[in-house]
Amino acid sequence: MADERIRAAGALRESFRAPGLSLSKVLKRYVNFASFVVILILIATFLPSAKTNKLVTANTSGITPAPAPGTAGVMANGTMCGPGVPQVTWSKYSPLCEPAWNPAKDQNGGATSNGVTATTINLTYREATTSELQLLYGLVHESVIGTNAAAETTMAAYIKFFNSQFDLYGRKVVLVPFTGQGNFISEDTGGGLTEAKADAVTAAHTLNAFADMSLVDASNAYAQDLENQGVISFSIYENPQSYYVQNAPYAYSPGPNCSENAMADAAIVAKSVDGLPAIYAGDPSMHSMPGKVGILYQDTPTATQCAQEMANDITNVFGAPAPAMQSYAFDLSTFSQESAAMIASMKQKNVTTVICAGCDPVSPAFLFQAADQQNYYPEWIYSGLFSEGFTGADGFGTLYPQDQMIHDIGIGEPMPSNQLQQEAYQVYLKTKAPLSQLLPSYTFAYVSLLQFFDALQAAGPDLTPATFQQGMFNTRGDLPDSAAGGNYGGWHFGPNRFDPAASIGIVYWDPNAKSNLSGTEFYGKKGAFVACNGGAQYSFTDDFAALPNHKQLACFGKS
């Protein structure tokens, strides 16, 4: 049966690209693997389990205080520290320097928290099972997603290098991979809750995790259970700001979170779409029509909240007309028909710009084909589930029907053409790990680990979830705003900053631009996200105030 589902998945992947072949025909043939396709939905619905007692931390009296940032002395990486000097020179997102910790005389408190000893900090990574990955590759090639081995090699390489560069007060981060009982396919579709909780208990009590960073192999159910067990969870899935507040001090993300993403997309459509000719639509007749916005979103608690925040921002923050709203329940056996109905509704309402809010990686394939079948070619704004927007995501852009994708806009950062300016790639080269094992989606791993190490140094030697949060909140002033020109937008740490995302750019898909995503098979090939508005950055903290009002974006080669 597994082999049959794998073959079916591959056939469906090809059907997304085949002209003239409808999804309804394909689905009649391949409905039997419905449980697989939703692997890519990665539904952003958190499924809370009963709260358990948080793990008790040790007595931490007698701990040597961390030196003040900028104190003169030799750093852990062998260079000199001083006022205003960054801890590392290879990152735009570095903390301020500290003199190296001396384990011979300085005391870090030893086992200050679960997963922490005098010399180690445990970071778990729950692996996807082989069968899950085989099914995943049937729809999305491993050149886009990557393998378990590549994820572990990439993370371990970054961790080893970071351990030599950051000051962790006598400790080193240790990656602890494990294959759990849970199945993230089931968990992301509302099942497998018992197994997800069991895996969280294993991480917390058997593997003694201080934190978990399972990237795309996690799920919101697993993350929630980790947090309930007192384990810090770094998730690349977007959730509202209220989720992180509710689950403090255990939930973090590289960002932007979905509240920030909702505001960004609301600013884009209210300032650059509403009432203006829809010049980037694929249908020439729309070029003279006043822009009108519609939002499609999954009927899940998180996606619904994020879409409602977006609609509220459009009307109440920016004063634009209310968008047309349409929710959907992702049921593979009916989604082709549901997509057709949603597209018909958007078309009938003269919507020129469609936002796929909290959009999973599968839905656009259905929506785009439904739009093709109805000769509907609007502007699209893809507002996805993952952190970092379209940054480092050129591979994903190749998955969808290109006649619709070429009218797609989103937030994110294009990779610089100069490889020397590609931070994550250059740091991977410093690790000396084999390029053949670099995870294609290494951006996710790099930014998550960089944020983790920034906060670990800022937390000080008395390491607990509470002091880790103080580090993220920049209580001591260790974490300055990121330097200009970073690959991942601007970062800012401070009170209630569960993610550091402070600013980001706007990009569009260009099927003819060459990808600069070094270290992957996409490098140098056609298909890449390209900067709009000359690469300008916009701040989440001031509601994209620098984005010109009532002026169309300069995208798709237009100025």
Image (cartoon, rainbow, N blue to C red):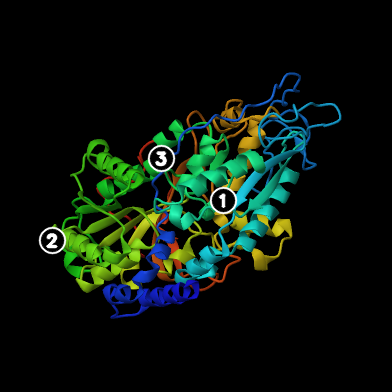
**Closer to viewer: mark 2 or mark 1:** 1
Q: Earlier in the sequence, mark 2 or mark 1?
A: 1
What separation in Å lies between label 3 and label 2 (alpha carbons)? 33 Å
* Rendered position, 129 above or below 74: below
SS under mark 3? loop
Viewer can see residue 540? yes
> Which residue shows up at 76% across the image and 19% down it?
62
Looking at the picture, tell me which residue is in the foreground, 191 or 316: 191
SS under mark 1? loop
Viewer can see residue 406? no
Residue 80: image x %, image y %? Answer: 77, 37
Question: What residue is shown with label 3?
Answer: 540
> Which residue shows up at 56% across the image and 50% down it?
214
Residue 163: image x %, image y %? Answer: 73, 44
Question: What residue is shown with label 2?
Answer: 348
Residue 46: image x %, image y %? Answer: 41, 43
Question: What residue is shown with label 1?
Answer: 214
